[in-house]
Image: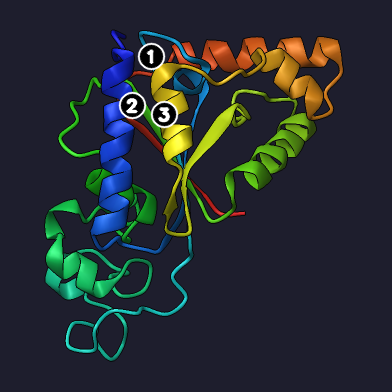
Amino acid sequence: MSGFERRDAVDRLEELVDTVEEERMPVPVREVWAFGDVALGLDPVDRLDIYLTKDILMRDDSDSDTATTDGGMGDEYDIEGVGKSVRADWAAEYPEYLRANANGHAAPERCLAAHLLGEVGDDDPIHFEVCNAPFEDNVTQRLRGAKLREDYTQLLDPRGVCLWAEGTRSEEAMRKLREGELALPTLSSALEMLGLDGEEAETAARDLHAWREQQDGVTVRGDVV
């Protein structure tokens, strides 16, 4: 896993935020966060971690000329759920980014990844998280679940920085990210701040680091909380 030079990793994040601001998304996006290695000032960045908060599409807000009366366009794309889980007008404009899950249903997290990550190679070390819950809420939710299951490999690294929220870009956060100025604790210390005792936090940090080292290429995770 070769990783990215820091400036290239932050350039990718800036391009991603530009795309969220300027282009139609498959579902409404509320927040963009960077977390993990890139937030720690490391150079190179072994793995680029990105988190998006999105809305669950309860009602398609596509133009009436594009949306169908039953809210679906699956016959056209051989994928179910267009107009239900992703916007119909987005699919019409960006059919090359339309992606399905294993059941053949349009998967918002995969559609967002295809659209926002651009021309990435299969070997590019990027982890892309998408959830309907804000980053900080999902950090605590995943921590509770990990403690109950005694499985820390699916923790969400709490050391993150919000780059864009509700239409507002944080130029200061992006500057600090680019210059490596963020002062963030070790993973075990961050987990202690969230309520784990010292030994448990060390174990959790080791487990999460070991899991991350086993990941190759682009990985995409979608959560509903």
Dot 2 falls on a residue whose secondary structure is helix
Q: What x and y, as percent, mark residue 67?
A: 24, 83
Nearest the eye: 215 or 51: 51
- Residue neighbourhood size for the residue with mark 2, other residues' Cα within 10 Å, grouped as few (<14), some (14–19), many (≥20): many
Residue to which mark 1 is pinned = 45
Q: Classify 58 as above or below 16.
A: below
Q: Is residue 73 left or right of residue 55?
A: left
Residue for point 25% across, 39% down: 15
Q: What x and y, as percent, mark residue 180?
A: 46, 16
- Residue neighbourhood size for the residue with mark 3, other residues' Cα within 10 Å, grouped as few (<14), some (14–19), many (≥20): some
Residue for point 59% across, 53% down: 133
Q: Is residue 106 left or right of residue 171?
A: left
Residue 175 marker? 3
Give the CA distance from mark 1 to mark 2. Answer: 10 Å
Residue to which mark 2 is pinned = 10
Total numbered badges shown on the rendered structure: 3
- Residue neighbourhood size for the residue with mark 1, other residues' Cα within 10 Å, grouped as few (<14), some (14–19), many (≥20): many
Among numbered discs 1 and 2, the one appearing first in the sequence: 2
Nearest the eye: 128 or 147: 128
| Circle 2 or circle 3, nearest the eye | 3
* Amino acid on which disc 3 is placed: Arg
Q: What x and y, as percent, mark residue 65?
A: 17, 88
* Amino acid on which disc 2 is placed: Val
Dot 3 falls on a residue whose secondary structure is helix
Give the CA distance from mark 1 to mark 3. Answer: 16 Å
Do the residues under discs 2 and 3 have CB atoms within 8 angstroms? Answer: no
Query: Could one spot residue 106 in this view of the protein?
Result: yes
| Circle 1 or circle 2, nearest the eye | 2
Query: Could one spot residue 113 in this view of the protein?
Result: no
